Amino acid sequence: MAASEEKQFDPTPRRLEQAREQGQGAVSPDLFAGVVLIAGLVGLSTAAQEIGSGFYHELRNLATSGLTKDFTPTHVQGLLTGVIRRGIDMTAGLVVMVAAATLLVGFMQSGFRFSPGVLAIQWGRLTQGWDRLASLGNLSRVA
């Protein structure tokens, strides 16, 4: 069939079901990107004050506590671990909101259908790639 020709018939329900089982379907990456961008901007606009002031206070506490004590590796590790944990606590809401928006868009586009066959390792493709990677020609270029 030439590229300019159109199909004369719509796909049968069985063909549509087979395509879904194989994980094929119409998905718009632009819609995903747009929703994630909007969700991130809305999340940042609502949480920016809290995140900014939280990081400011953490850095201030880190600077003032570090000036009064000797810097032993254990002390520095404790300070940095505390700062990282509090940073994760401050930004967790934003990350959850963006992840939820992404899942919602994915569900709206293709519905919920778990296809374990799509997630399975395709050993045939893996061994072909390994054969090309470990070919005599490639090994001679490395040496």
Image: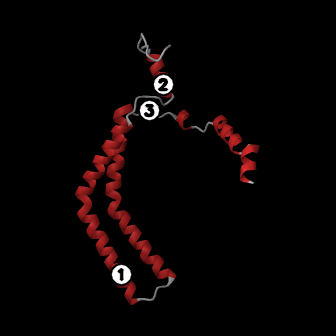
Gap in angstroms between the C-alphas marked 1 and 2: 58 Å
Q: Earlier in the sequence, mark 3 or mark 2?
A: 2
Q: Residue at x 40, y 68 (%)?
A: 85
Secondary structure beneath disc 1? helix
Query: What residue would you read off at disc 1?
Result: 63
In-front residue for pair 71/116: 71
For residue 139, the mark is: none
Gap in angstroms between the C-alphas marked 3 and 2: 12 Å
Q: Nearer the viewer, mark 1 or mark 2?
A: 1
Mark 3 and 1 residues: CB-CB less than 8 Å, in contact?
no
Q: Earlier in the sequence, mark 3 or mark 1?
A: 1
How many numbered marks does the figure carry?
3
Query: What residue would you read off at disc 3?
Result: 113
Asked if 85 appears above or below 94 in the picture, the reply is below
Circle 2 Cα neighbour tier, 10 Å, few/some/many (<14 / 14–19 / ≥20): few
Point out residue 13 in the picture as x, y percentages from the top left corner: 43, 17
In-front residue for pair 138/66: 138
Circle 1 Cα neighbour tier, 10 Å, few/some/many (<14 / 14–19 / ≥20): few
In-front residue for pair 76/114: 76
